Amino acid sequence: MAQHQAKTVRRKAEHVEVTLGKNVQCRAKSAGFDDIDFVHCALPELDFDKIDTRSKLFGKPMSAPIIISSMTGGYAGAEKINAELAKAAQELGLAMGVGSQRAMIEQKSLASTYNIRKVAPDIPLFGNIGICQLKKYSPAQIEAAVSAIGADALAVHLNPLQEIIQPEGDRDFTGCLPALERLCSKLNVPVIAKEVGSGISGEVAKQLERAGVKFIDVSGAGGTSWSGVEIERSGCHYEYWDWGIPTAVAVVDVARSTRLPVIASGGMRCGLDVAKGIALGASYGAAAQPFLAAVSKGGAKAAACELQSWIDSLKMAMLLTRAHNLEKLAKAKLLVTGQTAERLRLL
Ligand SMILES: Cc1cc2nc3c(=O)[nH]c(=O)nc-3n(C[C@H](O)[C@H](O)[C@H](O)COP(=O)(O)O)c2cc1C
């Protein structure tokens, strides 16, 4: 194995180890959901068991608008993690992304570590690649990686902060937008643009929409800090630990700046956060760390249990705001206070 390939594989393993073994959550910044309250409805006149959380992604049905965010693949241990997350997603009818497929493009034999279709034939599934890699790999190479795992879409991650803190990371971010535009025009599946925990602004979302992206996953600040993960690996630039746009603020900014469906992620920690994300303008809620933590404790069973508790929590918010379905929830009245209100006012 070439030296840079070995480094890619080792880095993917370290990311999971650091996320699970250290506290790499944002410290002084929250995702903003604590500043957001629904107006409680003491007279719901709804049957909890008839609340309809059903949604669709890439034309496929979902039992609820909850997504397991892109995380892993590319090293031996990743195969089990992906398979267990996928089993839980299949059991509950939810969607999932795999981690960056760079490792399998560089080394074909690693494809099996991403291939979850054998345990999750029906779920909406998306592949993943970093935006800087689009300058290195042709749309045909990326298309081959997406179809090798039977994915319905591709998430392209934008992660400049993580790259510049990572000692072996990319430094040249020029030419990424034209490369993304080229990919969107050639690929046979839709492209999701996502951050990894620093958020996407309305202005950047507009550029992404013009480039041909079909979904925006804001992946804002307030949850897993990817500068935190890299700081734990490299030991420098602590001042960037909490950098980024809090998720709740990013959702509002992107939803009012584009017509694209928005995925709320970054620090979403329960179904109530998903409900708040939807009321702020998102169509889906996603998370990474909570589902990885569940799998590491108790495999697919624990992940399914965690995901079921998110669905129940989402339904509770719907009952208590008299929202019998997601369209009604999207129109629920919110009270926004504190730093989130202040940030939205300044925007
Ligand atoms: C172990 C781990 C590995 C990750 N790897 C990727 C990746 O390869 N590609 C990507 O787009 N995001 C990756 N992410 C970022 C997540 O998809 C997500 O955007 C971020 O962790 C914020 O969500 P959270 O606060 O729920 O963890 C990873 C996250 C974790 C925890």
Image (spheres, rainbow, N blue to C red):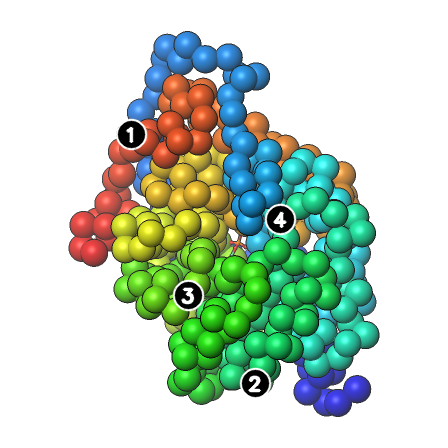
Q: Earlier in the sequence, mark 2 or mark 3?
A: 2
Q: Earlier in the sequence, mark 4 or mark 2?
A: 4
* Few, some or many residues within 10 Å of mark 2 (<14, 14–19, 20+): few
Q: Amino acid at mark 2?
A: Lys
| Residue 260: x %, y % from top left | 38, 53
From where the camera sits, is residue 95 visible? Answer: yes
Q: CA distance from mark 1 to mark 2?
A: 46 Å
- Mark 2 highlights which residue? 136
Judged left or right of residue 221, residue 103 is right
| Residue 256: x %, y % from top left | 27, 50
Q: Earlier in the sequence, mark 1 or mark 2?
A: 2
Q: Earlier in the sequence, mark 3 or mark 4?
A: 4
- Mark 4 highlights which residue? 124
* Tag of residue 333: 1
Q: CA distance from mark 3 to mark 4?
A: 20 Å
Q: Earlier in the sequence, mark 3 or mark 1?
A: 3
